[in-house]
Image (cartoon, rainbow, N blue to C red):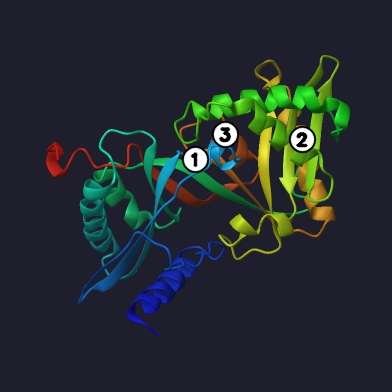
Amino acid sequence: MSSIEAVFAAHRARIHAIDEHADVPDVALDDVARVIEVEDDQGAGVAVIRRIEVDPATQMAMWSAPRPWAIGLRLHGDRIGDLASRLLERVDDYLIDNAPRGNPNHAALVRIAARDVDLVRPLLRHGYAAGTVTALRTVSPDSDAPFEPGAAIRQARQEDRETLIALATALQKFDASFGTLGEPNELRPLIETLVDSMLEPDSTLLLVAETGEGIVGYASIADPESSDWITSSTTLAPAAYLGQAYISPAARGSGAGTALTRRLHAEAAERGWNGILLDYAAPNPLSGPFWSRHGYRPLHVTWQRRPAHPSLGRGGRVR
């Protein structure tokens, strides 16, 4: 086992000890921009930097900055925070030379286990902010107390397409206001493709909440086979991914969102799934409280610095 592989293995064991349900996806070392190592008698760390070019004609353009720099940190030892600070300083040296200054199309992204709290202070000191929370709920068929639903829940139909496009567009624009998503110039075709894919019954369950005023919200969940890109983040299996959920502003607080969520949980339990993952913007004042009330808790957090270039150095000095 190489020294890097040893650090990866020790990091994974450390995360498992912190959070039994958090896992660490493998980091491929091929086609990476840079691998940085630090080591002392207290431990060791590795940063893997990968530059990604997002195709504006694909769905990824909705979820990401056009040119993200994905930075994987793997650390083990007695002084994790100190090791993280040293690694992030070296990462900054690299980005100073390679990321354009002041360009918001470039974002530096660091994803960590939510309970790996020793990394929080170093990330803050290097100009990162919590961007996206990946949350997990353990599926239980009878964990939800009775309540009075605020809407009727049914499976979406093809004739709902235009309403779903309007709701999905509203969701995208609302979430984009928190600075964690992409803002493609041609949003409508991407939304249409997204809605059409959700309406396909093979891998996605798409539900709508309906009142006397019509459809007021929707939620979709992809089965575990279609969610393997994210389920490597958890030891809980099989796990599905709740990719979309939105209630129109006028219907918020009516119980429609709770009705949708509980129906999804019941469907997941019936299918034998053990976990549900979802993402929400950390600055969103609505998402965190709502999902927490429904049994979700942070599993991973993606920290973001946008622009990626570290314009301010230690002590606020301009670089």
Rate crowding at label 2 as few (under 14), some (14 to 19) or many (20 or more) other CA atoms within 10 Å.
many
- Secondary structure at numbered mark 1: loop
In the depicted view, which residue is nearer to us: 259 or 187? 187
Residue 95 is labelled as: none
Q: Is residue 222 left or right of residue 184?
A: right
Q: Name the residue tied to disc 1.
A: 64
Lower position in the chain sequence, tag 2 or tag 1: 1
Q: Quadrant of the rendered structure where residue 102 is? A: top left
- Amino acid type, callout 3: Ser
Q: Position of residue 176 (x, y in %)?
A: 51, 29
- Secondary structure at numbered mark 2: helix
Report the label total.
Answer: 3
Lower position in the chain sequence, tag 1 or tag 3: 1
In front: label 2 or label 1: 1
Q: Position of residue 76 (x, y in %)?
A: 34, 70
Q: Name the residue tied to disc 2.
A: 260
Task: Kindly tell me whether residue 150 is visible in this rendering.
Answer: no
Measured in 3D between alpha carbons, the distance from the residue under mark 2 to the one under mark 3, in whole angstroms, is 14 Å
- Amino acid type, callout 1: Ser
Q: Name the residue tied to disc 3.
A: 287
Q: Position of residue 278 (x, y in %)?
A: 61, 46
- Amino acid type, callout 2: Leu
